[in-house]
Image (cartoon, rainbow, N blue to C red):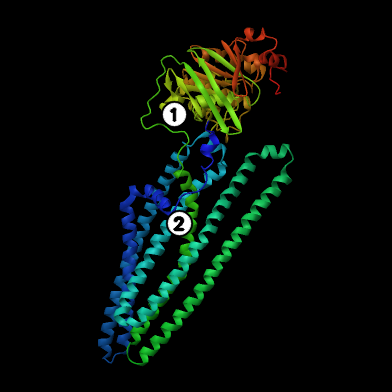
Amino acid sequence: MISYSEKTRHAYTGTATTIDVFKAFWRGMSRHKPTLFFSIFGVALARVFSIIIPIYYKKFFDILTQVMSVDARVAELISIITVIFGFNLVVWAGYRLGTFASVHFQAKVIADLKQISFDYMIDHSYAFYANNFTGSLVQRVNRFARAFETLADRIVYDVLPLFFQISGVCIVLWFTNPLITKILLVWIFIFLSFNYVFSRWKLKYDLKRASVDSFTTGVLSDAVSNQNNIQLFTGSKFESGYFKKVTDDQATLTKFVWNLQGVVDTVQSLLIFIIEFLLFYFAIKYWQQGIITIGTFVLIQVYLVGLGGHLWDFSRVIRNIYEAFADAKEMVDILKYPHDVKNLPNAEVLKVPKSEVNFEDVGFSFNKERSVLLGLNLKIRSGEKVAFIGPSGAGKSTFVKLLLRLYDVSSGRISIDGCDISKVTQESLRRNVSLVPQDPILFHRSLLENIRYGRRDATDAEALEAARLAHCDEFALSLPTKYDTYVGERGIKLSGGERQRVAIARAILKNAPFLVLDEATSSLDSHSESLIQDALDKLMAGKTVIVIAHRLSTIRKMDRIVVLEKGKVIEEGSHDELLRNDSSLYTKLWNLQAGGFIKDE
């Protein structure tokens, strides 16, 4: 039998490469190629004319040193200044075009990348979310989008301009003085090579830092989510100490990474000092020999200052790019990892004419040491109401998760009306099952929106009628804005019993042929339970019902009671039939009840 953890244990091991990150970004970019073109074109236009302008500075200073009449000199200078002014207008227009196009492009792509991430991540399995911090996952999506913004800015505003700057400067200087150009090219090669090699080596620490950052966020989110537990168990000092250790580890790694950047800055400063000295030396030497003019000397210095500024920032650019890849890689790892539970390419839509369920030799295991279900064979007839009971860990909740295909079986098959549920779409399967969980979790939306989630195309009148049948009116009408009241994150503004009534209202509204009740009245007081029971009786009419029971008094009227122990069916029958056997587990559990609840053995 293949264990479930064996299929999922490599889910979160990063395997994404730089190419994978580019492919993921391209998925978001591909719909916005025209704005990408205008963004690059505008910046390229500006950079080309920025390189041409210093040539006219050269002419300007050469004219100042030439022997000619004042009027002729002024006319020439005015002509040059006019050209420079016009070229600067082109530079201004190019940058404005590139900026506005880039703003539009990035905003649209970021939205698409977030949507792609959400759509893929939301379809991951129950096991995926059980093995990941929620806060960490949210941060991965946000950092993925921010990583694209960083990468786009660095490429459009730094890498491409630097490419045009180096190419243009070298072309112009080659026709001015080839030797100076060769010296500059060798220096640029050394400078860029050092930055590239060092940044590649440093990448592993950037990746580790991104991972530690996500872990820290996950720990913080987990602590905030468990704030009530921390107070109840007086765990403030313990959690504070644990979080301090996590942040101290993060600070140590962050300081190390920043110190590495300090090494880069030190070497860069030395290299820039060397090239400035060399170019000054040769420029002065050639000027003394009459090989170059004062204008050429100015041209070289203007180019050197501009190039030095761009190259000084190059390490920052490389660092930002690698950090962006490190941030994006965490999300791309998730996008690369295939869904554990997925539809077959030719999956059909489930049709339920009879609502009959059949478990055939079903086995399920989380790992080799923990088998939850072992060769389960069970048939639930159409319209039958079946309750499942048993000690903790017997497999009751797993039975429901397998029926809903939140997990795939390790062996055997589950069929509905003869159709293997692994061969139908997950959406059509779950559309035919209404679940009332023991601890319902609600969206931070209005109460009415949460009820309508059972059937999102329902009218207000239909949703309100379902709420009335579930006796939600008793608390909803006393809320500040009644059914338009927001219920808080996870429904925290409502009590457990109120959330359970909302879940029952959803099931009433959904009206699916299968109904699964996971101790649906466990959070209700006796008065509320008596009211809800009538609604549940009406809801169960004509449906195939599966009840997970912890309180045996709620299942006496079931058609059949299935007793599970250690993943196997050990007894089944009606309440009266099972009680006739004094040595049965059901009888023992019944006798061990206190207030209707099972005591764990």
Whether residue 126 can be seen here: yes
> Could you tell me the amino acid type at mark 2?
Thr
Q: Residue at x 29, y 71 (%)?
A: 86
Q: Quadrant of residue 103?
A: bottom left
Specify the label residue 65 is tagged with: none
Foreground of the two, 156 or 567: 567
Disc 1 marks a residue whose amino acid type is Gln
**Percent x, y of residue 215:** 59, 48
Q: Secondary structure at mark 1?
A: helix
Q: Is residue 318 above or below residue 267?
A: above
| Rendering coords of residue 507 (x, y %) | 51, 21
- Vertical placement of residue 537 versus 489, above or below: above
Q: Which residue is mark 2?
A: 150
Query: Which residue is label 1 attached to?
Result: 426
Number of labels in the image equals 2
| In front of the other: 78 or 420 | 420
Task: Quadrant for the C terminus, please.
Answer: top right
Residue at disc 2, secondary structure: helix
Residue sitting at x 57%, y 25%:
373
| Mark 2 neighbour density, 10 Å: few (under 14) some (14–19) many (20 or more) | some
Residue 195 sits above or below residue 533 on the image: below
Residue 97 visible? The answer is no
* Closer to us: 280 or 348: 348
Q: Is residue 45 left or right of residue 466?
A: left
Along the viewing direction, whichever of 84 and 177 lies nearer the viewer: 177
The residue under the point 41% across, 32% down is 343
Q: In this picture, is 33 found above or below 359?
A: below
Q: Position of residue 186 (x, y in %)?
A: 40, 76
Residue 317 % position (x, y):
46, 63
Please indicate whether residue 138 sits to the left or right of residue 32 in the image: right
- Distance Cα–Cα, label 2 vs label 1: 37 Å
